[in-house]
Protein backbone atom coordinates (compact mmCIF):
# COMPACT_ATOMS: atom_id res chain seq x y z
CA UNK A 1 0.00 0.00 0.00
CA UNK A 2 1.43 3.42 -1.06
CA UNK A 3 1.96 6.08 1.65
CA UNK A 4 -0.27 9.20 1.46
CA UNK A 5 1.55 12.40 0.51
CA UNK A 6 -1.20 14.97 1.04
CA UNK A 7 -0.30 16.09 4.57
CA UNK A 8 2.64 18.37 3.56
CA UNK A 9 0.67 20.02 0.77
CA UNK A 10 -2.25 20.59 3.10
CA UNK A 11 -0.02 22.26 5.68
CA UNK A 12 1.70 24.47 3.09
CA UNK A 13 -1.53 25.91 1.67
CA UNK A 14 -2.45 28.02 4.74
CA UNK A 15 1.14 29.33 4.87
CA UNK A 16 0.91 30.25 1.18
CA UNK A 17 -2.37 32.11 1.78
CA UNK A 18 -0.83 33.97 4.73
CA UNK A 19 2.21 35.00 2.72
CA UNK A 20 0.09 36.20 -0.20
CA UNK A 21 -2.19 38.14 2.14
CA UNK A 22 0.85 39.75 3.74
CA UNK A 23 2.28 40.74 0.37
CA UNK A 24 -1.05 42.20 -0.70
CA UNK A 25 -1.23 44.21 2.52
CA UNK A 26 2.27 45.57 1.91
CA UNK A 27 1.36 46.43 -1.66
CA UNK A 28 -1.71 48.38 -0.53
CA UNK A 29 0.35 50.07 2.16
CA UNK A 30 2.91 51.19 -0.44
CA UNK A 31 0.08 52.51 -2.60
CA UNK A 32 -1.22 54.50 0.37
CA UNK A 33 2.24 55.92 0.99
CA UNK A 34 2.51 56.80 -2.69
CA UNK A 35 -0.88 58.53 -2.63
CA UNK A 36 0.17 60.59 0.38
CA UNK A 37 3.49 61.51 -1.25
CA UNK A 38 1.77 62.64 -4.45
CA UNK A 39 -0.73 64.68 -2.44
CA UNK A 40 2.05 66.32 -0.42
CA UNK A 41 3.99 67.01 -3.61
CA UNK A 42 0.97 68.72 -5.10
CA UNK A 43 0.57 70.81 -1.97
CA UNK A 44 4.20 71.92 -2.10
CA UNK A 45 3.90 72.82 -5.78
CA UNK A 46 0.83 74.92 -4.97
CA UNK A 47 2.58 76.62 -2.05
CA UNK A 48 5.68 77.42 -4.11
CA UNK A 49 3.63 78.83 -6.98
CA UNK A 50 1.45 80.88 -4.62
CA UNK A 51 4.39 82.38 -2.72
CA UNK A 52 6.25 83.23 -5.93
CA UNK A 53 3.12 84.82 -7.44
CA UNK A 54 2.62 87.02 -4.39
CA UNK A 55 6.27 88.09 -4.40
CA UNK A 56 6.31 88.76 -8.14
CA UNK A 57 3.18 90.88 -7.82
CA UNK A 58 4.88 93.05 -5.21
CA UNK A 59 8.08 93.15 -7.26
CA UNK A 60 6.14 94.48 -10.25
CA UNK A 61 4.52 97.14 -8.07
CA UNK A 62 7.91 98.22 -6.71
CA UNK A 63 9.34 98.39 -10.22
CA UNK A 64 6.39 100.55 -11.24
CA UNK A 65 7.03 102.88 -8.31
CA UNK A 66 10.67 103.15 -9.35
CA UNK A 67 9.68 104.12 -12.89
CA UNK A 68 7.28 106.74 -11.49
CA UNK A 69 10.11 108.23 -9.44
CA UNK A 70 13.01 107.65 -11.82
CA UNK A 71 13.69 111.40 -11.98
CA UNK A 72 13.91 111.63 -8.18
CA UNK A 73 16.80 109.35 -7.17
CA UNK A 74 16.44 110.40 -3.53
CA UNK A 75 13.44 108.02 -3.41
CA UNK A 76 15.15 105.07 -5.06
CA UNK A 77 16.57 103.47 -1.94
CA UNK A 78 13.22 103.46 -0.17
CA UNK A 79 11.73 101.73 -3.18
CA UNK A 80 14.50 99.11 -3.28
CA UNK A 81 13.95 98.55 0.44
CA UNK A 82 10.22 98.09 -0.15
CA UNK A 83 9.44 101.07 2.05
CA UNK A 84 6.71 102.40 -0.23
CA UNK A 85 3.21 103.52 0.69
CA UNK A 86 0.23 102.33 -1.29
CA UNK A 87 1.43 98.85 -2.22
CA UNK A 88 -1.27 96.20 -2.48
CA UNK A 89 -0.14 92.94 -0.91
CA UNK A 90 0.12 90.02 -3.30
CA UNK A 91 -1.93 87.55 -1.25
CA UNK A 92 -4.74 87.76 -3.79
CA UNK A 93 -2.38 86.50 -6.48
CA UNK A 94 -1.24 83.77 -4.12
CA UNK A 95 -4.79 82.52 -3.77
CA UNK A 96 -5.26 82.52 -7.56
CA UNK A 97 -2.14 80.40 -8.13
CA UNK A 98 -3.00 78.02 -5.32
CA UNK A 99 -6.41 77.49 -6.90
CA UNK A 100 -4.81 76.68 -10.24
CA UNK A 101 -2.93 73.90 -8.44
CA UNK A 102 -5.95 72.36 -6.67
CA UNK A 103 -5.28 73.99 -3.33
CA UNK A 104 -6.31 77.04 -1.32
CA UNK A 105 -4.39 79.50 0.83
CA UNK A 106 -4.82 79.09 4.58
CA UNK A 107 -2.36 81.81 5.54
CA UNK A 108 -0.46 84.58 3.79
CA UNK A 109 1.97 86.90 5.55
CA UNK A 110 2.88 89.99 3.51
CA UNK A 111 6.35 91.54 3.83
CA UNK A 112 7.21 93.24 7.11
CA UNK A 113 10.82 94.36 7.18
CA UNK A 114 13.87 93.14 5.31
CA UNK A 115 14.38 91.02 3.38
CA UNK A 116 11.00 91.40 1.74
CA UNK A 117 9.32 88.02 1.72
CA UNK A 118 5.97 86.27 1.61
CA UNK A 119 5.12 83.21 3.68
CA UNK A 120 2.17 81.35 2.19
CA UNK A 121 0.49 78.29 3.69
CA UNK A 122 -1.81 76.10 1.61
CA UNK A 123 -4.05 73.05 1.94
CA UNK A 124 -4.98 70.75 -0.90
CA UNK A 125 -8.58 70.74 -2.13
CA UNK A 126 -8.49 66.98 -2.62
CA UNK A 127 -7.85 64.47 0.18
CA UNK A 128 -5.23 61.75 0.02
CA UNK A 129 -8.02 59.34 -0.94
CA UNK A 130 -9.28 55.92 0.09
CA UNK A 131 -6.58 53.50 1.09
CA UNK A 132 -5.83 50.69 3.50
CA UNK A 133 -4.74 53.32 6.05
CA UNK A 134 -7.79 54.54 8.00
CA UNK A 135 -8.64 58.24 7.76
CA UNK A 136 -6.84 59.06 4.52
CA UNK A 137 -10.14 59.67 2.74
CA UNK A 138 -10.55 62.84 4.84
CA UNK A 139 -6.90 63.84 5.16
CA UNK A 140 -5.68 66.91 3.27
CA UNK A 141 -2.02 67.83 2.81
CA UNK A 142 -0.82 71.11 4.27
CA UNK A 143 2.47 72.90 3.70
CA UNK A 144 3.97 76.34 3.21
CA UNK A 145 6.56 78.18 1.15
CA UNK A 146 8.55 81.39 1.51
CA UNK A 147 9.38 83.64 -1.44
CA UNK A 148 11.95 86.42 -1.11
CA UNK A 149 12.20 89.71 -3.02
CA UNK A 150 15.74 91.05 -3.20
CA UNK A 151 16.95 94.25 -4.91
CA UNK A 152 19.57 93.69 -7.58
CA UNK A 153 20.72 97.28 -8.03
CA UNK A 154 23.03 99.71 -6.31
CA UNK A 155 23.72 103.35 -7.02
CA UNK A 156 25.41 106.39 -5.60
CA UNK A 157 23.67 109.74 -5.47
CA UNK A 158 25.50 112.48 -7.39
CA UNK A 159 27.10 115.31 -5.47
CA UNK A 160 25.34 118.60 -4.90
CA UNK A 161 27.34 120.24 -7.70
CA UNK A 162 26.19 117.68 -10.29
CA UNK A 163 22.93 119.46 -11.05
CA UNK A 164 19.33 118.30 -10.99
CA UNK A 165 19.46 116.85 -14.49
CA UNK A 166 21.99 114.13 -13.66
CA UNK A 167 20.80 110.67 -12.67
CA UNK A 168 22.97 108.13 -10.85
CA UNK A 169 24.41 105.17 -12.71
CA UNK A 170 22.37 102.14 -11.75
CA UNK A 171 24.37 98.94 -11.38
CA UNK A 172 22.06 95.94 -11.51
CA UNK A 173 23.75 92.59 -11.08
CA UNK A 174 26.11 92.46 -14.08
CA UNK A 175 24.80 95.42 -16.08
CA UNK A 176 25.22 99.18 -15.70
CA UNK A 177 22.38 101.48 -16.70
CA UNK A 178 23.42 104.99 -17.72
CA UNK A 179 20.13 106.85 -17.41
CA UNK A 180 19.48 109.91 -19.51
CA UNK A 181 16.71 112.08 -18.00
CA UNK A 182 15.89 113.39 -21.48
CA UNK A 183 15.46 109.92 -22.96
CA UNK A 184 13.92 107.32 -20.64
CA UNK A 185 12.84 104.84 -23.29
CA UNK A 186 15.36 102.19 -22.21
CA UNK A 187 14.78 101.41 -18.55
CA UNK A 188 15.44 98.24 -16.55
CA UNK A 189 12.46 95.95 -16.13
CA UNK A 190 11.14 94.41 -12.90
CA UNK A 191 13.35 91.34 -13.34
CA UNK A 192 16.39 93.62 -13.72
CA UNK A 193 15.60 95.58 -10.56
CA UNK A 194 14.54 92.75 -8.24
CA UNK A 195 15.14 89.04 -7.89
CA UNK A 196 12.33 86.78 -6.70
CA UNK A 197 13.15 83.29 -5.47
CA UNK A 198 12.06 80.69 -2.97
CA UNK A 199 13.85 80.74 0.35
CA UNK A 200 16.20 77.82 0.98
Image (tube, rainbow, N blue to C red):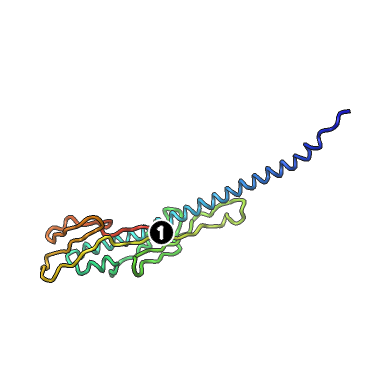
Q: Residue furthest bottom?
A: 160
The answer to whether 152 is drawn above or below residue 160 in the figure is: above
Residue drawn at point x = 35 percent, y = 60 percent: 55
Taking 77 as reference, is 93 left or right?
A: right
Residue lying at the far top in this picture: please name it: 1
Give 50 or 173, whichever is nearer the viewer.
173
Q: Is residue 22 above or below residue 159?
A: above
Residue 136 screen position, x and y as percent: 58, 55
Nearest the eye: 37 or 57: 37
Residue situated furthest right in the rendering: 1
Residue sitting at x 14%, y 69%: 159
Task: Determine the image quadrant of residue 149.
Answer: bottom left
Residue assigned mark 1: 200
Q: Residue at x 34, y 70 (%)?
A: 113
> In the shown orientation, is residue 39 left or right of residue 26?
left
Quadrant showing the C terminus: bottom left
Q: How many marks?
A: 1
Q: Position of residue 171 (x, y in %)?
A: 22, 59
x and y percent of residue 127 in the render? 53, 55
The quadrant of the picture occupied by the N terminus is: top right
Mark 1: few/some/many CA within 10 Å (<14, 14-19, 20+): few
Give left or right: position of 80 versus 168: right
Circle 1 sits in a helix, a strand or a loop, which is it? loop
Q: Residue at x 21, y 64 (%)?
A: 155
Q: In the rendering, at what x and y percent does residue 58 appear?
A: 32, 62
Amino acid sequence: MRPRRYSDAGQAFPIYITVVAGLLFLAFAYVAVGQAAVNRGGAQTAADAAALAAAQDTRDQLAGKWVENVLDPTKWQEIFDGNVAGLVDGCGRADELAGQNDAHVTGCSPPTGLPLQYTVAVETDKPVGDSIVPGTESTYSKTHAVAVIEPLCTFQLPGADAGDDVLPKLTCKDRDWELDPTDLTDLPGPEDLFDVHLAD
